[in-house]
Amino acid sequence: MFENQQRDDVEALMKADAEFRRLFQHHRELKSKVHDAEIGVLPIDDVTLAGMKKEKLHAKERLQRMWDARVPQIH
């Protein structure tokens, strides 16, 4: 997430906003779990996987809104 953004900008926002940092880390954990489930390393049922994907998407959308609202303030 935020691969096309400057790493310094992402790190600055994570330092400045504890909620952004917490949500960013949560999204990263969900991304890893979803990947592991999809390749068969993490055995979970389809309903749980679908819920994790939905939660990951909501986290990503919230992070994007936070990013869009805060980035101009970093510069």
Image (spheres, rainbow, N blue to C red):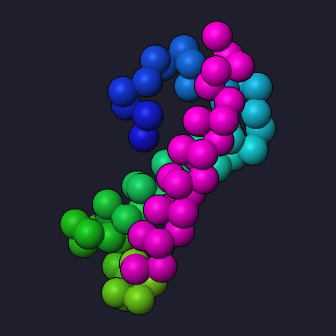
**Which residue is depicted at the point 77% across and 38% down?**
18
**Residue 37 in the image: x percent, y percent?**
32, 70
Quadrant in the picture for the C terminus: top right
Q: How many marks?
A: 0
Q: Is residue 65 magenta?
A: yes
**Which residue is depicted at the point 42% across and 62% down?**
33
Bounds of the magenta segment: 50-75
**Residue 45 in the image: x percent, y percent?**
37, 88
Up-down relation of residue 49 to residue 47 (above or below): above
Relative to residue 6, is residue 68 drawn left or right? right
Is residue 53 visible in the rendered structure shown here? yes
**Residue 6 in the image: x percent, y percent?**
46, 17
**Residue 20 in the image: x percent, y percent?**
68, 41
**Which residue is depicted at the point 47% across and 72% down?**
54
Q: Main secondary structure of the magenta part?
A: helix
Up-down relation of residue 58 to residue 3 (above or below): below
Quadrant in the picture for the N terminus: top left
Up-down relation of residue 10 to residue 53 (above or below): above
**Which residue is depicted at the point 44% across and 34% down?**
2
Is residue 26 visible in the rendered structure shown here? no
Up-down relation of residue 32 to residue 4 (above or below): below
Q: Identify the image quadrant of residue 8.
A: top right
Relative to residue 66, is residue 41 drawn left or right? left
Furthest residue toward top: 75
Q: Nearer the viewer, residue 12 or 68?
A: 68
